[in-house]
């Protein structure tokens, strides 16, 4: 951008970014910038976005002289400028490392090479939308209006694991339910993949 006749280069993070199929240019939404607290000042030569009503953070100029389309001239950020764009805090590291718990993340700070320093851990566990959605139960299957007329015509199966390995080294079990007779069968397994044994028991 040009401020008082001097060219100044700034590194900014524009968020959110959406993908529009078949779009060959990058569009900026002034409404989104206004909702984020920025102010707009404009004339025929440029449109400026101001933070705190005085700090110019973004500047757009006409595509060509006399044009009503304003463009932002910029390039993608290089790796050296990433730290100046993203704030490394507890929430960011929690999401980037696969939603680890606070205890595991605190150990990662000491055991992981290159882990950012100076991150403060909250005393209470903050609510993470991703963790909350991941722990929600799945939607139930729709009810079926038909029923099998012959035994073993339709079998419902599920594979579960025991919390402790049994005396005979069985860790898993396969639950089978015959829809016709509503009989349940339970087959213990040492490893989760024993299809031959399940077919033999059937």
Image (cartoon, helix red, strand yellow):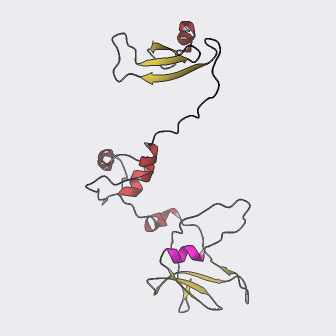
Q: Tell me residue 172's x, y (percent).
A: 43, 19
The residue at the far left in this view is 123
Name the foreground residue: 128 vs 145: 145
Q: Quadrant of the C terminus?
A: top right
The residues colored magenta run 30-36
- Residue drawn at 39 percent across, 54 percent down: 93
User: Does the magenta-highlighted stretch encompass residue 31?
Assistant: yes
Residue projecting furthest to the top = 200
Q: Is residue 103 magenta?
A: no
The quarter of the picture where residue 63 lies is bottom right
Q: Which residue does the image show at 40% across and 14% down from the upper left?
A: 170
Vertical placement of 78 versus 34: above or below? above
Whether 198 is drawn above or below 135: the answer is above
Q: State which quarter of the image contains the N terminus.
A: bottom right
Q: Main secondary structure of the magenta part?
A: helix
Front-most of residues 80 and 151:
151
Total numbered circles: 0
Tell me what residue is drawn at x 51 percent, y 75 percent. Answer: 35
Q: In x, y percent, where is residue 15?
A: 53, 66
Left or right of residue 149, residue 34 in this image: left
Q: Position of residue 193 (x, y in %)?
A: 52, 19
Q: Residue at x 47, y 64 (%)?
A: 82
**Residue 156, position as x, y percentages in the image:** 56, 21
Would you say residue 107 is visible in this rendering? yes
Residue 10 makes an appearance in the image: no
Considering only vertical position in the picture, is 127 above or below 200? below
């Amino acid at each position: 951008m040009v401020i008082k006749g001097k060219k100044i280069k700034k590194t900014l993070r524009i968020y959110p970014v959406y993908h529009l199929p078949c779009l060959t240019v990058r569009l900026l939404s002034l409404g989104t910038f206004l909702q984020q607290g920025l102010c707009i000042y404009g004339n025929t030569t440029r449109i400026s976005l101001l933070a705190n009503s005085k700090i110019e953070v973004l500047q757009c100029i006409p595509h060509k002289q006399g044009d009503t389309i304003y463009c932002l001239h910029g390039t993608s950020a290089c790796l050296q400028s990433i730290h100046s764009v993203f704030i490394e805090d507890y929430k960011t590291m929690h999401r980037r490392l696969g939603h680890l718990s606070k205890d595991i993340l605190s150990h990662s700070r000491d055991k992981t090479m290159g882990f950012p320093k100076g991150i403060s851990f909250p005393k209470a566990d903050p609510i993470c939308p991703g963790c909350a959605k991941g722990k929600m139960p799945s939607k139930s299957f729709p009810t079926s209006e038909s029923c099998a007329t012959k035994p073993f015509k339709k079998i419902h199966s599920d594979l579960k694991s025991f919390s402790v390995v049994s005396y005979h080294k069985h860790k898993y079990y396969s639950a089978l339910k015959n829809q016709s007779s509503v009989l349940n069968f339970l087959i213990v397994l040492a490893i989760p993949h024993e299809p031959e044994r399940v077919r033999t028991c059937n």
